[in-house]
Amino acid sequence: MLSRTADHLFWMARYTERAENTARMLDVTYQTALLPQSEAVALIGWQSLLNISELLPAYTALHGEVNARDVMNFMVKEETNPSSIVSCLRAARENARAVRGTLTTEVWETQNQTWLEVLRKVKGDEFESDPGQFLDWVKFRSHLSRGVTLGTMLMDEALYFMRLGTFLERADNTARLVDVKFYAVQSEFFGSASEKDQEYDFYHWSAILRSVSGFEIYRKVYRDVIKPELVAELLILRADMPRSLHASLNEVVDNLAMLSNAQSGETLRHAGKLCAEIKYASIDEILATGLHTYLGQFLDRVNDLGARISRDFLMPEEA
C-alpha cells in the first residue's frame, strides 16, 4: 500500500476517535459540573480539561478567563482549535475523501453524513439547548463509523491501518481522561473521605465510568461500591474493558504485527514492551509511583510510538 493512502486511512480513524474522546471528556466534565459544589471547584474541572488537552494557552489567547460556556464552545466548534469536535470531524471527512476509492460506499457515506449533520447541529441551536444530547450524538456517530468499517471493509492492510489509528488514539485519550479527573482530585479522593462527601464521591466516579461506557462493566466486574483505585484499575489494567489502556495496546500490537515490514521491527518491540509492562503491572504499584506521573510517562511513550509508526509506514513528516 502507498504510504500516502495508509496515512489518510490512519488519520481518518484517529480523528474520528479523537472527536469521540473529546466528546467523552466534555461529557464527564459537564456532568460533574452539575453536581452541588462551589463555582471555584467546578471551574477547576474545566481548567483541568484544557490542561490535559494541552490547549490552555490557545484557549486563554482567544477567550481569556476560563468559564464553562467558552470552554464548551472552544472544544466543540472552534475552527482554530485542531482538537475541537468540528475540526476533528472535518479532518476525518477530508482524509476519507482523499482515499474514497479505498473505502466502501458505506464507510464513505457514514463519514460524509456525519460531517454534514454536525455542521447543521452547531449552526443551529441543538448544541446550546442540550449539550449532553449533542455529545451523545458524537459518540454514536463514532460507534457507527467503526461498526460500518468492521462490517464492510476487506480485512487487509487498509483495515489494519484504520484499526491502528483508532486504538493508538484511544490509548492516548483514555490516559488523558483518567488523568484529568484523577489528578485534580487525587489528594481528596484517595484520602479518607468524610461521610458527607460519600454521596458526591459516588456521583463523581459514576460520571467518569459512564463517560467511558464503563458503569455497568464496573458493577459486573467488581460487584462493589465505586472506589477510585478500582476505577483506575478498570481503565488502565483490565484487558477485557474495551476502552482501557491495556485493551487499546493489545489492539495496537496486533495490528502492527499484521502490518510489519522490513523497518518496523523496533516499533513493534516498543509497542510490545509497553503492552507487557501494563499486562504485568498492579494498581497498587502504579498508585505508589503516583498516578499522574505514571500516566504522563505513558502518554510520552504513546506519542513516541505514534512518531515511530509515522516514520515506518506513513508519509514522512515535514521538517
Image (cartoon, rainbow, N blue to C red):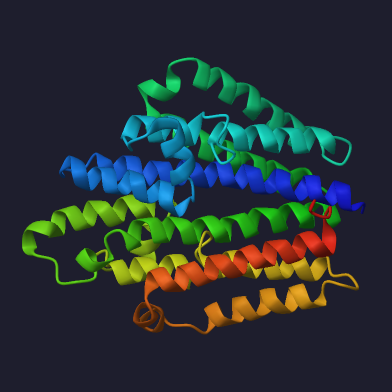
Residue 18: x percent and y percent?
58, 46
Is 3 situated above or below 302?
above
Quarter-of-image position of residue 24: top left
What residue is rendered at 44% in x and 54% in y? 52
Q: Residue furthest toward the top?
A: 124
- Measured as percent of width and height from the top left, residue 286 is found at 41, 79
Is residue 309 visible from the viewing direction of this image? yes
Residue at 72% over, 47% down: 11
| Residue drawn at 43 percent across, 82 percent down | 282
Specify whether 139 is left or right of 255.
Answer: left
Q: Looking at the image, can residue 239 be seen? A: no
Say which residue appears at 37% left-offset and 26% top-offset.
130
Residue 199 found in image quarter:
bottom left
For the residue pair 3 and 283, the one nearer the viewer reads as 3
Q: Nearer the viewer, residue 313 or 62?
A: 62
**What is the tally of numbered marks visible in this picture?**
0
Q: Is residue 140 above or below residue 176?
A: above
Answer above or below: position of 67 versus 168.
Answer: above
Name the side, left or right, on which 270 lies relative to 286.
Answer: right
On the image, the x and y values in percent for residue 145 come to: 66, 40
Q: Is residue 86 left or right of residue 182?
A: right
Q: Quadrant of residue 82?
A: top right
Above or below, comparing residue 255 to residue 314 in the picture = below
Where does the image place residue 149, in percent across and percent down from the top left?
73, 45
**Residue 267 horizontal side relative to residue 47, left or right:** right
Quadrant of image for the N terminus: bottom right
